[in-house]
Amino acid sequence: MKISKILSYVVLAVGIIGAILWYVMSSSISDLMDQNGVSEARELSLDEAAPMVSPLYTLTLIIFVVTIVATLITVFSTLAKNPSGLKNTLIGIVAFLVVVGLGFVMAEGVETPLKDGEVLSESGSKWVGTGLYAFYFLAAVAVGLMFLSGIKKLIGK
């Protein structure tokens, strides 16, 4: 059996466990909200909701680690089978880093007060802006390429 098939089964199993835990957590929080007479989960105190959310949070961390490991195994096994793809992979990584770098240069960092009384640091604000600029740029490129592909199909037919 190939490693990719095994990893697919692992991801499927973890997904099923996550769905079950999500259902259990969701119904438990609904019951807790009814008991306390609140209409939104955010109105619950942390002490009341934490025991119900902790298992799902732990599973989320496990899924995150499993996903990263599975992705790295798949990528490196594919690159080992096809070393010529390494050049294209490096080009993609460098292009992404350039987009993030441009977003970082364009972003402004400003200390920002948050709703809970905390303050978002200047550095944190700059990284949030970086992510937003990178997202907007990549989204614009994706929409532009879809538009260009549509025009080519219209011209070609």
Image: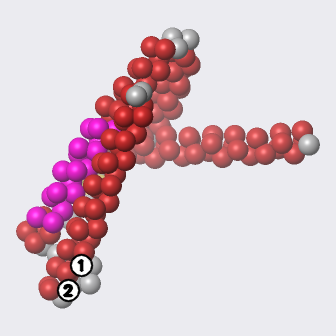
Q: Does the magenta stretch include residue 123?
A: no
Relative to 134, say whether 44 is above or below. Answer: below
In the displayed structure image, the side of residue 95 where residue 65 appears, left or right: left
Residue 143 image position (x, y, % from top left): 66, 46
Residue 139 image position (x, y, % from top left): 58, 45
Which residue is at the far bottom? 37
| Mark carried by residue 34 | 2
Residue at the location (22% across, 57% down)? Answer: 56
Residue 122 image position (x, y, % from top left): 29, 44
| Mark carried by residue 30 | 1
Could one spot residue 135 in this view of the protein? yes
Relative to 33, say whether 139 is above or below. Answer: above
Could one spot residue 90 in this view of the protein? no
Which residue is at the far left? 47
> Which amino acid lies under the numbered mark 2 shown in the image of this protein?
Asp
Disc 2 residue crowd, few under 14, some 14–19, many 20+, Cα 10 Å: few
> Which amino acid lies under the numbered mark 1 shown in the image of this protein?
Ser
Relative to 72, say whether 137 is above or below. Answer: below
Residue 21 image position (x, y, % from top left): 24, 61
State whether the magenta stretch is mostly helix, strand or loop: helix
Please report contact status of discs 1 and 2: CB closer than 8 Å, yes or no: yes
Q: What element carries label 2?
A: helix
Bounds of the magenta span?
51-67
Q: How far apart are marks 1 and 2 (CA)?
A: 6 Å
For the N terminus, the image quarter is top left
